[in-house]
Image: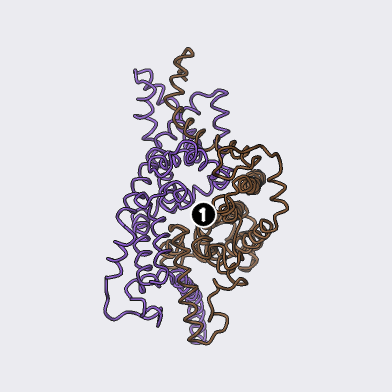
Amino acid sequence: MKDLRWQFEIKEKKRKNILPFLRQLLLYLLLAIYLFPFYLVVINAFKDRRAIISNPLGLVRPVKLTNFSAAFIKMNYWQGFWNSLVITALSVVLIAFFSSMTAYYFLRYQGRISKFLFFLMVASMLIPFQAIMIPLVRIYGSTFKLLDNKWILIYMYLGFGSSLSVFVYHGFMKSIAVELEEAALVDGCTRIQTFFKIVFPLLRPTTITLVVLNVLWIWNDFLLPSLVLISKTNRTLPLSTFYFHGTYTSDYGLLMAGLLLTIIPVIAFFILMQKHVISGMLQGAIK
Amino acid sequence: MVTEKGFCAKLKAFLIFAGPTTFVFFTVVIIPFLFGIYLSLTNWDGIAAAYRFIGWQNYLTVFQDQLFWKSFFLTLKYVFFTVVLVNVIAFVLAYLLTRGVKGENFLRAGFFVPNLIGGIVLGLIWHFVFSRVLVFIGKSLNLSFLSYSWLANPEKALWALVIVSVWQYSGYMMIIHIAGLVNIPKELIEAAIIDGASAGQRIRRIILPLMVPSFVVTLFLTLQRGFMVYDVNLALTDGGPFRSTELISMHVYKKAFLAQEYGIGQAQAFFLFIIVAAITLAQVYFSKKWEVEM
């Protein structure tokens, strides 16, 4: 009797152990399928065209780096990387700087103008970029001849990015106590000093969230830079990847190496800032 | 709160704090938007310096344009399947990944990876997968449905686009669902278990109703992105073969910048604006409504 019961308990235990195990197996299998395209990029980046056509799934024997060095030169990688870096970094910093100040103004100087402008910014988040792109090119291109210029692109990112950032900063700033600022003002700080010495440091979590959101958006953006940047030397990384692909359509090894080079910076950013990226994207979605 | 006295001081504060943002915002967003409405009422072709006001004619042309409607209905089909599949897959992943599996954080991060990468690169990767790898697999295993590239087949190219979009967004939506699932009080689930509710009943009767706010967010986010998709569309199929995957954003782009019919393109873009705005307003309405009920 006792034996039987003991056996039954073991069975029960096994059953309980096997379910989570199956679940885990299923999840890892799914993940493998999810990441399979990236795996294909990696293995084929080391092969030549003939090896890829004869078998895109096979692994290579002699690992060659020729594709990478060729892709580096042919897609003008450093130029693209540098342009992307400058545009992304400057835009993100400027957006954080000006949007936080604006949100502060809207909150501390409440009046008809603040209310109206804030409403306008929130409402403008309804406008898809496609509804603006044609007049934008018309105004900045044919009228002012300002296109094909990194700085004007940064200017545009500041314009397009400020609404969301002002909105998010505004929401977070409501929770900051006014008393702290009053104390600073009484002690003789000017408004600007009060803002930068007291308020801005308190906004740190929001700033990180917005920086992450804006970095991913601007770094990966294609449509706006494709309209604004025309000459080869101004291209950002997504643009040079795209045009590179158009030029070497069937040189697969070279293309895969180029794609891998484009992916690496974003993955590095993700690994460094993993927690911030996921929570940032979450807050950006719920806002 | 201490506030500045006098008009000059107030103006100075405005110019310092809100001035730059307001100026840039107006010159980049508001003025082009208003100018766009005006442009859609003219016959500008992109080059001519002179163009005239032609009233509603562009909108009439758009409504009679069969290619535009074709593109619009293709977009509806694409959006419908993408939204449904993304949400189902994202919820299932989130559910499985909130039950204490080993390596949970690693798995979550892994599913999230496609989201980090721009649509252009994702489209190019899948272009290779569809036109080379899957064809290779199909040929070597004698699977007829894979032995020709889906991207060259007008019947299947749209499905390729759906697959890539589902792959791209389900990790992101999974994160939103995970946040929702984690917030469900444990006591509720435990009480249900004690009362003898099966796993299926727990999902249907307790978890899904409590997840409505998360679903509002993911549904509308996927809807919005679906209607605005461009990058993946361009890199994967470029609208082809035979316009079988030319979704609405690409249609607008081609109308304006390739066919040089800017006025008509802008009228179509305005149509897209109305759809996206309606979706977003509906989201705000529904999330407010359900917030009160909770």
**Element at badge 1?**
helix
Residue sitting at 54 percent across and 79 percent down?
B148
Q: Is residue A106 visible?
A: yes
- Depth check, front residue: B71 or B145: B71
* Residue B10, image x, y percentages: 47, 18
Residue at the outermost top position: B6
Q: Where is mark 1, residue-wise?
A: B179
**Residue type beneath disc 1:** Ala
Q: Tell which subunit mark 1 falls on.
A: B
* Residue A191, image x, y percentages: 39, 22
Give the chain ID for the purple colour: A
In screen coordinates, is A221 left or right of B51? left
- Above or below for A134 versus B247: above
Q: Is residue B185 visible?
A: no
Mark 1 neighbour density, 10 Å: few (under 14) some (14–19) many (20 or more): some
- Above or below for B185 versus B132: above
How many numbered callouts?
1
Image quadrant where residue B225 sits: bottom right
* Residue B139, image x, y percentages: 50, 85
Residue sitting at 61 percent across and 71 percent down?
B154
Give the chain ID for the brown colour: B
* Residue A128, image x, y percentages: 57, 46
- Above or below for A216 versus A160: below
